[in-house]
Amino acid sequence: MKNLLASIGQLLFPNLCICCQGYLSQQEKFICDFCEFELPRFESFEQKDNAVAKKFWGSIKTDVATAYLTYGKGGAVQRLMHELKYRGNRELGIEMGKWLGWALNKNDLLANVDVLIPIPLHNKRQRERGYNQAELLCRGLHEVTQIPVASDAVTRERYNVTQTKKKRYERYINAKELFRVNTPELLENKHVLLIDDVITTGSTMISCGEVLLDVKGLRLSLAS
Ligand SMILES: [Zn+2]
């Protein structure tokens, strides 16, 4: 009966693949198997010295820094990100968090990670959007890995993000104005995996990472 209702629902309100707009089967979620297979995975995902990790060399010390997918203009990932950020598709965020979790697990990249922290949005932005997409990713990641999420560990004090070209000291001061660690004592000697939806210049991750690295004994990894 449940299946029958689902089938009727599918006839009336067909689920379409976010990427190709084709019909989805009942087993497929958000994107069809073909599009999922074709998603542009970040090829050096599991390598320590991948292109994402290199963005942070010379600015912050990271254990693992990686991304699951690569972003191309007009491509499937852009469509997914648009759906996640601007169309309120929270379930998709959780699902994408699971993708990241499966990939990290498979490559054994989560060894010793104690806690997941989403890059916080500024309060105002979060109220406008109603959710923080990085936090949704963390929730999916948690479902796969069981690693706890500390959503309130860091808050964003200001809107703007520092420039990567700034001098190290200026950048540090800027970071301190942008992000605040609320409960440093709970993060002492912990391995934190900081999560964002995208890494472009890396400046958001660097700013947030800098304030986290002030916590005693904290080890930092980054993923998007
Ligand atoms: Zn598709």
Image (cartoon, grey):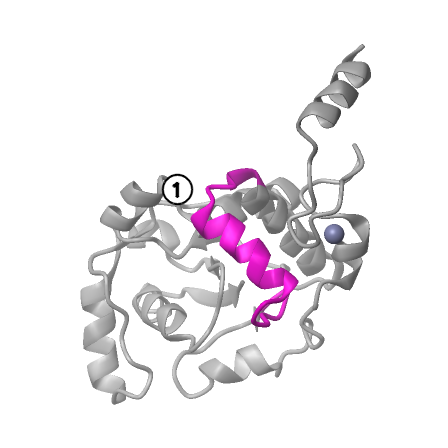
Between 111 and 27, which is closer to the camera in this rendering?
27
Q: Nearer the viewer, residue 153 or 8?
A: 8
Label 1 Cα neighbours within 10 Å, binned few <14 / some 14-19 / many ≥20? some
Q: Can you give x and y, in whole percent of width and height, for residue 216 in the image?
A: 34, 64
Q: Quadrant of the N terminus?
A: top right
Taking the magenta stretch, the answer to whether it contains residue 28 is no
**Residue 27 placed where, x, y %?**
80, 35
Q: Does residue 147 appear in this view?
A: no
Magenta-drawn segment = 67-91
Query: Which element is circle 1 on?
Result: loop
Q: Residue furthest front?
A: 12
- Residue 33: x percent and y percent? 80, 50
Q: Nearer the viewer, residue 222 or 99?
A: 99
**Vertical position of residue 104 compared to residue 169: above or below:** above
Residue at the far top: name it.
Answer: 1
Q: Residue at x 39, y 57 (%)?
A: 119
Quadrant (top left, top right, bottom left, bottom right) of the C terminus: bottom right
Res 113 quadrant in image: bottom right
Q: Is residue 124 left or right of residue 112?
A: left
Label 1, on which residue?
Answer: 131
Picture quarter containing residue 12? Answer: top right
Q: Residue 173 at what x, y percent from top left?
A: 19, 75
Instruction: Say left or right for 83 vs 205.
Output: right
* Residue type (three-letter) at the residue carrying disc 1: Tyr
